[in-house]
Amino acid sequence: MRTHRRWTGILLVMAVSLLLTVPAFAADGEAAASGMYGTFWALVPPVVAIVLALITKEAYSSLFIGILVGALFQCSFAPVATLDTIINDGLVAAVEGNAGIFLFLVMLGTIVALVNASGGSAAFGRWAEKNIRTRTGAMLATFVLGVLIFIDDYFNCLTVGSVMKPVTDGHRISRAKLSYLIDATAAPVCMIAPISSWAAAVAVATAGLDVGYTGIELFIRAIPYNFYSLLTFVFIIALCFMKFDYGPMKIHEMNAQLNGDLGALEDASENEGNPKGRVIDLVLPVVILIVTCFVGMIYVGGFFGVDAWGGTECAGDFFGAFGNTDAFIGLPWGGLISLVLTIAYVVARRLMSFKEAMACVPKGFVAMVPPIIILTLAVALKNMVGSLGADIFFETIMTGAAASLYSMLPAIIFVAACVLAFSSGTSWGTFSILIPIVAAIFPVGSELLIIGISACLAGAVCGDHCSPISDTTIMASAGAQCDHVNHVSTQLPYAITVAAVSFVNFIIAGFVQNALICLIIGAVLTVGTLFVIRSVTGGKKTA
């Protein structure tokens, strides 16, 4: 507590010092704003928010202070303009731009509440207790389910969390570990799945570029070199079988096993539900949700002959529909149908009355309030970072490095993408910015171009995975019902370990230019690193 108070005091003094400089900055007007635009100052707001969150263990005020710093920089410390920027360009824009995903969160929260009240979750937990008998099996089952749900990362996080909580709770796996498993199989698997919203986003980002391939073809060719995504899977499997943890995760896992404290946000007693519930009462709503959301996404993309956006007709074109879709519309589309069908099902099964089913609506909303607030603040902070020209700053770095470190460029691209995605909290925005730059650096159709694109995509996923203000990280916390700061602090050492191995692999790939050789080296390095870490940390098993 003394340390927290000391750091908070230091940061407050720094904030007051900045505010005392208002006259100097305000007097210069536009010159002050242009002096910060496209420079390192664009990264200061998210750094302030992230450092504060890790120190104070409190996300709401930390994110808001980051927004405040970004608005002050953008408006040259003018008080009225700063307030207007926070409200209009930050918070209001965040709510407007994410209204669809907010709706999906509330609908999914309601479906989870219905499944819990019907006894489906408890029944699935009892079944899992008999059939999944070890903690390793429970973690591997979570990993496999995460890999199988590859259509969209938001959908992955929330669905896997809802299904696997009874299983991991029964084996005393902490919610921090569950949220890591969810997060590590959300964006990473979407980034190597040709049929996903992420593949469509990459195809859109490469449209109009002279790279020698179509967007989807380039994405598929880049998969073998996406070391961060692939080695994350190696890392998870190895960690499960080696049965140990390190860093803050070790404390959470030991606390779960020894004290039964899973670190859950909700009251576990509320999950018992109707004793007549069966496993099908959980499985069927989840299957309905998967099917309706999948259909919703391709419908919005125009697969059935209705082009939702007035663009290219995509009737019957599966890949084209995914490239033309918008998950913020498609997921609520499917979520609403799934919610209505789930209510009809539990009432028809006489697991609850219609009135009791309706009582689950506010319960679902309340359960999703924390992630909605964090998501709103995180998106507002992203808006501040974007308005300060972080993309211009990284474009300058990338073009400057191209001339002197050609074979090392994939590794440099990976680091740059990591930093940009970590600071902005968006992987899609990161690779949309960097892909045109990468395409301009390397020869058309060359193997180095493929490696450079892979490094860009891998770095975007890595930074997104580590960032506290990332949508996917927030969704993983929501899916596991885990405190967001706990999730970030526990998964960071794991993600950094894989990132370090991936960086070495991209250095090798720049010279070797063979995906199979690099993957073998990366897998050996990943497992070897875990053995070293287990030896250094005492080799005590916690997994």
Image (cartoon, rainbow, N blue to C red):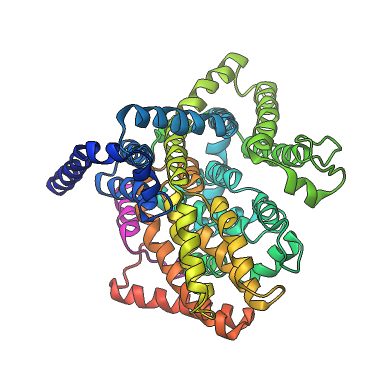
Q: Residue at x 80, y 36 (%)?
A: 307
Q: Position of residue 95 (x, y in %)?
A: 51, 30
- Which quadrant would the C terminus be assigned to in this image? bottom left
Judge whether residue 263 can be spotted in this image: no
Residue at image location 56% in from the left, 33% down from the top: 97
Q: Is residue 202 left or right of residue 71?
A: right
Q: Nearer the viewer, residue 25 or 437?
A: 25
Tell me where residue 366 sits by quadrant. top left
Dominant secondary structure of the magenta stretch?
Answer: helix
Q: Residue furthest top?
A: 355
Asked whether 466 falls inside the magenta stretch, the response is no
Q: Is residue 281 left or right of residue 477?
A: right
Question: Height in image: 274 above or below 305?
Answer: above
Residue 56 seen in render: yes
Q: Residue at x 31, y 36 (%)?
A: 61
Residue 234 position, x and y percent, is: 53, 69
Q: Is residue 416 left or right of residue 447?
A: left
* Place of residue 337 in the rendered image (x, y in percent of width and height, measured from the top left): 70, 29
Q: Bounds of the magenta span?
A: 239-260
Spot occupied by residue 26 in the image (x, y as percentages of width and height): 29, 36
Q: Is residue 255 magenta?
A: yes
